[in-house]
Image: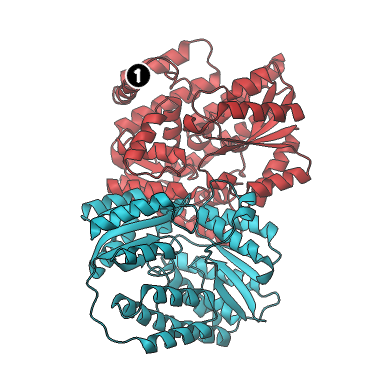
Amino acid sequence: MPRRLGYVSSYFPKEIALAMGYVPVRVMPAGVDVSQAEGVLPRNFCAYLKLVAAALLEESDSWDAVIILEEDESHRRLGDVLKELLPCPVITAELPLRTDEMGVGRFASVLKKLVASLEDGADPLSADSLAEAISQYNRLRRLWREARQRWLNAQLSTMEYHRLRMTALTSHPAVAEESFQDALSDVGESPPPSASGVMLIGGNAVKKPLLLMVEDAGLRVAAEDSDADEREFLGEIPIREDVATALHDLAHAYLNKPPSPRLCNPHARLAYLKRLMDERGVKGVVVSYYKFCDLNLAEYPLLARKFREWGVPSILLEEESYALSGQNRTRLEAFLEMLL
Amino acid sequence: MRDLFSLRGNTLSLKTKVRLLRLAARYTPLLELLRLKVRFSNGYRPHDRVSTEFYVWMMKHLYGSPAHRIVWANIFVPSELFWGLGLIPFYPEVGAAAAVGLGLAPKALEWADEMGVPRDLCTFHRVLAGLAGKDLFPQAGAFVVVNFPCTVAGQVLASEAFVRGSPFFTLDLPSSADDEAVDYLTSQLEDVAYRLAEISRMRYSKGRMREAIRLSNQARAYAVEAMELRKATPSPIRGSDMIGHLGMVIYLFGSRYGVEYYRMLRDYIARLRQEGHTEQEHQRHRLYWMHLKPFYQCDLFHLLENERGGVIAFEEHTAVWWEPLNEEEPFRSLARKMISHPSNGPVERRIEKVLKDVEDFRVDGVIHFNHWGCRQSQGALSVIRRRLRQEGIPLLELDGDCADQANFQEGQVRVRLEAFLESL
């Protein structure tokens, strides 16, 4: 049985885990029962991380290791709690806020320590195994970029693109590569999309029910600013001959992926969102966050203000579970009708 | 603080309070009157006089100085950094707590709602956003934030800096305490210091920074003595009042006021002990208070202290947790101070600190005030609960809100508090 490593953060360079003989699996909770997590986490704790905890606890015996990068205080405290509850090693690691050379150097050093923590019972990390893992993920990312372009051209349905994305994040890259190749070989030519474009902004990922609602309303999802799409690192990482340089490259690549709210850098974040909106012809923005998720929610007033200035209507939906609440469904319907 | 904001509880309308606050800030004679009132009235403790004088000084300088000399920071950025640069720190979270004390929170929260600030965020930061949005806070030459333990502060202040067009600096706080981590933070502190010096047009002076470190160490020495004196039974002073003085811990280290304040506090406690007096006569249960307290008027402490005889022997956040600083290595020392904060890093550090305090202050039980919206203090509370239970230390978790009275269920709190004290 391959060893499964669950990780909680899009900033974790999964190449490291693959090179050490693990199958890296991004924890992407959907319909899980949160009651066990409710017992150990406060009532007003980030609802998304509560789902993550529930998903990890539900299959507690199936993980060989879990890695939590400390994106914020809630991630850190989630690590404290899970260390007590999961039978496998739970490793928490710093995630620098700085993206400059100082931050990259720090992150490379953190990754080196993380490798040492993972080494117990795993394959040792070598320059060759890391180069192989990097090259495997580079291939997968190339396919992902192509799939995204096909999806934007309406040659791939949103649901299919969503499925492929999920496979890429939760399966062995070889398995995901095959899925992408199959899906891409089937796509044909089709006219460019005519429906108005909506940008979805989410935390870890935008929920499937939300995507479905947008498309059912006759609108087109033009961009998804979340850790599972636009903010997932999809670039290429050079192949190196030594581990230290490769770790430095990984640290640089992941830290400098498209800006997320955690960076506390409104200039970079707004510039990136504006570019995305202009490039994709976005007519409206749906912001969907889990309740009590400070990292994302604290940024919202500024985003809303800028969207107003740019003349783009926006709506904020806060949810406690994966499903859309009746009230938010009604609010969203009214918002989408306005965009038609 | 209570002296400066003793307007609370009277019948003045909110509008009048806001006007008075603005007037007081802009017309210094009013502040002088207030200062003189505190200085020459009976009933004020010596350290209260110092804190009032300090706040009067701050109001004058925050509202009377050019913007480039004022730096906004969140509460985990050490004040020595700013005093050592000749700058005036403004901690808007302390400003928000003061506004709560004045009874401004409901209006500030309403303003925050109008601005679209989500209601699930920490209410301190919502109050802060509301007040800042209405321009009630001073101008800012720059912003400095540290990303841990309170993450949301960085986000809120980053937005505020963006809106004001002010330079914004973040300090990336490592969770590990090894030399490499200290080097990382030291470099950032040096960098921020030189850039602040540039922005403020204040030439960086080694001597001034050394002086701030020296003053911080002097204040620290008095604060440690005061802590030692508080270990006595019966407890010489009321802990509930000390939690209200948290602003002193945040603002004063590195300033002359800090030395004066902690010297006065130490002398006051020593005198009480010498004379066999205590601030709280009725003392049945010695308690340790974790996290903050409601800053609005409520009966919580009247019930706890006066009715039920619970005495807060010590509180988590007024403690001196750091080693003396080194004048020759100011930034490295400050880095060590920041990294070693018990709330930084894994929860074990906080637990160790609590267990040590429980033993040192010989308390019978622990109360953790669960401020709505605070993830850092409550996120790993289940781990703290289990550890305290293993050690046989009773823990009461009181749900409430430090800033928004609407989230404070007084009846429920009373029942839980009474049951807890009976169980002791």
Residue A144 in which image quadrant? bottom left
Q: Position of residue A242 (x, y in %)?
A: 54, 84
Residue A68 is left or right of residue B41, and the answer is right
Residue B326 can be seen in this image: no
Residue B57 drawn at (x, y percent): 39, 27
**Residue A192 falls in image quadrant:** bottom left
Provide the secondary structure element on which disc 1 rests. Answer: loop
Q: Chain of mark 1?
A: B
Q: Nearer the viewer, residue B312 or A211?
A: A211
- Residue at x-position 51% and y-position 73%: A13
Residue that label 1 marks: B13
Vertical side of B115 occupied by B413: above or below: above
> Which residue occupies 26% across, 83% down?
A190
**Is B357 or B61 nearer to us in this picture?**
B357
The cyan one among the chains is: A
Q: How is the image coloured?
A: by chain
| Amino acid type at image mark 1 | Ser
In the foreground, A176 or B230: A176
> Where is residue B365 drawn, in percent x and y?
72, 33
Which colour represents chain B?
red
Q: Is residue B167 above or below residue B3?
A: below
| Quarter of the figure with the C terminus of chain A | bottom left
Crowd class of label 1 (few under 14; some 14 to 19; many from 20; radius 10 Å): few
Q: Residue at x 64, y 51 (%)?
A: A40
Question: Is A68 above or below relative to A247?
Answer: above
In the rendered image, residue B54, in percent from the top left (x then y), is placed at 44, 27
Residue A157 visible to an observer of this rendering = yes
